[in-house]
Amino acid sequence: MNKKFPDGFLWGAATSAYQVEGGNSNSDWWEWEKAGKADNESGRACDYWNRYKEDHYLLQKLGTNLFRLSIEWARIEPQEGVFSEEAILHYRKIFKDLKKRNIKTQVTFWWWTSPIWFSEKYGWHKKESAEIFARYVEKVTKELGDLIDIFTTFNEPMVPLGQGYLGGVFPPGHKNPLKFFRAIKNVAEAHKASYKIIHRIKPEAEVGITYLYNWYESEGFGILLNLVNRIAQWFRIDLLGNKIKNFQDYIGVNYYRLGKIKFEMRNFKINPREQKYFCFTIEEDKDNVMKWITYPKGIYLVLKEASEKFKLPIYITENGGPTREGLDDIERIAFIKNHLAFVHKAINEGVDVRGYNFWSLVDNLEWLYGYEPCFGLIEIDYKTLERKPRKSYFEYQKIIKNNGF
Ligand code: IFM
């Protein structure tokens, strides 16, 4: 074995509440689905809400010492200012079950979905949103904080804010740059307030946020494309990151793919003629179910960049890739090893990486794409909800056991 990881390295897997729990009918994404704006309705999803013990058993067998999961705000605060003791108690049971199995919990408070009342009355573009979110964080930290090892306020907030306020394809479905910038400001305020609250209640807590930290490269027309590249980096990290400096104990890196930016000529139809125009595009891998380009070296490049930029410990909070593979998932095995080899290289060169979470433990609802892309170490049969560990599950198990490969 030549890729030995540091002693105490945390090996984990990740899921998120809305994507696996099922039945989150008080969340805005539920309404979004009902309005036909996503490929599938989540429905009972993987029914993690009821089957969490089964999944935790599989986690335990996998050998993980970390599980990254999230809590659904809409379950905990189904009406404005009214907290569900029943939901809180249920999350307590979930966290306790993980603790019993010696698995650390890395818990995210907001993973793209909000209670319907929040979206209808406020939304992130409204100033009050920060304070309202902080109230929920305070309640959860008081009630569940003793069972949370690593706190994450927001997961990749730039994705839903971009999609929800510029692209209009996520709730609240706006296309309004002004609201977009206001929403970023309010999310930053919400994060900072939460950071202080969590530390007040649990001084030793590790609190952070995760960034979708893909790697961007460009080809052709040097100067112009480098500029585009810079803008992409500013957009994905700095726009929010600069606003919350000094309010992060670690950096959560979610790395998936290469964004290869091209500048090309396209045809554009203006009736009745066809016009040519130049535009920036992102190259696609046509063989991949979500057209993503796999690029293992990118994880090394982002780790180096993040370490240099933030000078903080790093958790790889997500890394994985979508496939259509069944149980014999050779592609996923190669994916894991190739990426881990680059994580190992970064650690050897001094980057302080504390843990790695594979995305995902189980197949789950991939937002607009529905249930088609599979990310899981474990396959879900959505008819029977049977869990079937894939080959990659057993390979990852070996890596964890040996603390390397
Ligand atoms: O499924 C998502 C997750 O919710 C956030 N990070 C990226 C994953 C894959 O697209």
Image (cartoon, grey):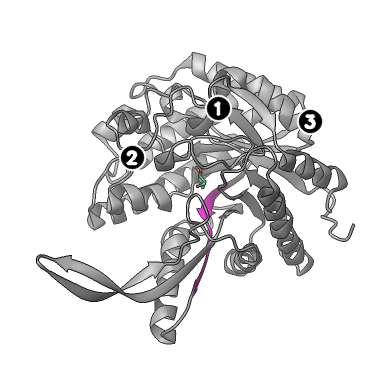
The segment highlighted magenta reads 208-217
Magenta segment, prevailing SS (helix, strand or loop): strand
Query: Would you call the spot at circle 3 few (<14 residues within 10 Å), some (14-19), or many (20 or more)?
Result: few
Give the structural element (helix, strand or loop) at label 3: helix
Q: Does the residue labelled 3 lie within 8 Å of ligand 1?
A: no
In the rendered view, does 180 fall on the left or right side of 107?
left
**Where residue 337 appears, x then y in whole percent?**
74, 55
Residue 155 within the segment the image draws in magenta:
no
Q: Is residue 43 positioned above or below 170 on the image?
A: above
Give the residue pinned by disc 1: 142
Q: Earlier in the sequence, mark 2 or mark 1?
A: 2
In the rendered view, does 120 fall on the left or right side of 103?
left
Instruction: Give the label, 1 or 3, closer to the camera.
Output: 3
Give the residue pinned by disc 2: 129
Give the structural element (helix, strand or loop) at label 2: helix
Residue nearer the viewer, 393 or 327? 327
**Where residue 380 appears, x then y in whole percent?**
60, 29
Three-letter amino acid code at the position of disc 1: Lys
Q: Distance between the residues labelled 3 and 2?
A: 41 Å
Q: Distance between the residues labelled 2 and 1?
A: 20 Å
Query: Would you call the spot at circle 1 few (<14 residues within 10 Å), some (14-19), or many (20 or more)?
Result: few
Q: Quadrant of the N terminus?
A: bottom right
Q: Can residue 96 be seen in this view?
A: no
Give the residue pinned by disc 3: 61
Q: Which mark is residue 306?
A: none
Tell me which residue sits at (72%, 32%) in the image. Answer: 59
